[in-house]
């Protein structure tokens, strides 16, 4: 997917801003860091916005991010990792303007560009406002007049706006033929990595188990209640070995039941201990969970210690085996919340 990144995502806040703003910036940038870096999607910026961030001192250079990380609350993703992820996007050339060469043939009245909701006034500086205004005007023109351009299916990555998932853009443009055009376009706003999953085919991302479980939890409106969990490599291996990944309804059921388990919604599931003495390891105990309710069906095997869960495998009902991860033998091993 092609995503244009709002410069506000990268614009480094001043250290004199509130602690909440510093924490929000670090947390939000960290939440996108892995997606920026892994190359699964095409994140891009405009040259105008890059120059604006540099000219106003808001460009996320490493020393600036290091200063922020000292003041912000702890984050799981390190400062250097986030910096490398940002730079990968900010130096992803060609920039937007060069990806749509026809833009060089038009003159844009920047003052005519209007955006609803107002994504401009929340920018940190006037220079950045003007640059982003120009960028969005170009996007509107390209979507309106150049159907074969990258703008056709372009998404906009931006901070959340309450009750709004679509940016509407109006602009006045003077074409090379001296024709004055009033253009309009709308662009879908993406605010979290999980929202991207809604736009993908389930078959494209099911193997990223942690993200799929969070995605399914968000669909079921219980994301905040997930217990700490870890997924062993045998989980996906067991699904592939039985060809379950090709059964969409069963796959949906598996992840739905995982969410019910991790929210400890016991009214929706039935689980019991595997039972044999060898299925205990210190304070960890092995369990099996009904994926399908019929006696001849599928079960999920997992380890549990208090509210911590280690998901192991999906297996036929008559299989009572479970692997024992080496980590759970360490009493100091703790699973962090995802």
Image (spheres, helix red, strand yellow):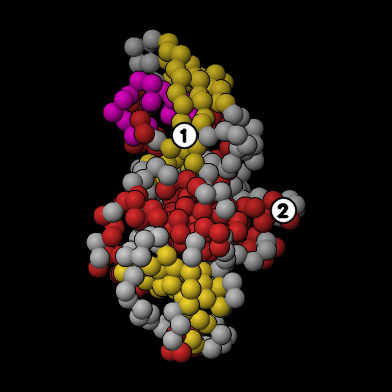
Q: Position of residue 12 (x, y in %)?
A: 61, 51
Say which residue appears at 44% left-offset and 68% top-offset: 289
Of residues 31 and 25, which is closer to you in this image?
Answer: 31
Q: Position of residue 260 (x, y in %)?
A: 51, 59
Examine the rendered structure and indicate whether residue 33 appears above or below residue 126: below
Q: Where's the N terminus, which quadrant?
A: top left
Say which residue appears at 46% left-offset and 83% top-offset: 275
Inspect the magenta stretch and tell me whether residue 109 lies in it: no
- Magenta-drawn stretch, dominant element (helix, strand or loop): helix
Indicate which disc residue 20 carries.
2
- Distance from the alpha carbon under mark 1 to that under mark 2: 27 Å
**Magenta range:** 134-151
Q: Position of residue 88 (x, y in %)?
A: 42, 54
Comparing marks 1 and 2, which lies closer to the viewer?
A: 1
- Element under label 1? strand
Q: Position of residue 282 (x, y in %)?
A: 53, 88
**In the shown orientation, is residue 296 left or right of residue 135?**
left
Of residues 121 and 197, which is closer to you in this image?
Answer: 197
State the residue position of label 1: 188
Question: Are the residues flagged by discs 1 and 2 in contact, CB closer than 8 Å?
Answer: no
Say which residue appears at 34% left-offset and 55% top-offset: 250
Examine the rendered structure and indicate whether residue 118 appears above or below residue 40: above
Q: Where's the C terminus, which quadrant?
A: bottom right
- Element under label 2? helix
Residue 14 visible somewhere in the drawing: no
């Amino acid at each position: 997917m092609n995503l244009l990144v709002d410069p506000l995502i990268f614009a480094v806040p001043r250290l004199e801003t509130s602690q909440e703003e510093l924490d929000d910036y670090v947390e939000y940038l960290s939440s996108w860091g892995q997606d920026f870096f892994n190359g699964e999607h095409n994140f891009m910026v405009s040259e105008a916005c890059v120059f604006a961030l540099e000219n106003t001192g808001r460009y996320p250079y490493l020393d600036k991010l290091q200063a922020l990380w000292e003041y912000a609350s702890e984050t799981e993703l390190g400062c250097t990792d986030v910096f490398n992820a940002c730079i990968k996007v900010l130096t992803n050339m060609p920039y937007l303007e060069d990806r749509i060469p026809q833009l060089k043939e038009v003159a844009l009245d920047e003052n005519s560009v209007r955006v609803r909701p107002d994504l401009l006034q929340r920018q940190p500086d006037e220079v950045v406002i003007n640059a982003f205004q120009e960028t969005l005007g170009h996007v509107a023109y390209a979507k309106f007049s150049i159907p074969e351009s990258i703008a056709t299916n372009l998404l906009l990555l931006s901070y959340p706006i309450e009750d709004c998932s679509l940016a509407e853009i109006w602009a006045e443009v003077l074409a090379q033929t001296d024709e004055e055009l009033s253009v309009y376009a709308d662009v879908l706003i993406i605010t979290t990595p999980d929202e991207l999953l809604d736009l993908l085919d389930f078959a494209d991302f099911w193997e990223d188990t942690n993200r799929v479980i969070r995605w399914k939890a968000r669909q079921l409106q219980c994301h905040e209640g997930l217990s700490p969990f870890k997924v062993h490599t045998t989980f996906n291996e067991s699904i592939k070995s039985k060809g379950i990944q090709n059964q969409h309804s069963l796959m949906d059921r598996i992840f739905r039941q995982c969410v019910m388990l991790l929210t400890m919604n016991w009214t929706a599931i039935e689980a019991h201990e595997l039972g044999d003495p060898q299925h205990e390891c210190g304070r960890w105990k092995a369990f099996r969970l009904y994926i399908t309710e019929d006696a001849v069906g599928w079960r999920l095997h997992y380890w549990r210690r208090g509210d911590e869960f280690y998901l192991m495998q999906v297996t036929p009902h008559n299989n009572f085996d479970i692997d024992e991860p080496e980590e759970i033998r360490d009493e100091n091993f703790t699973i962090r919340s995802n």
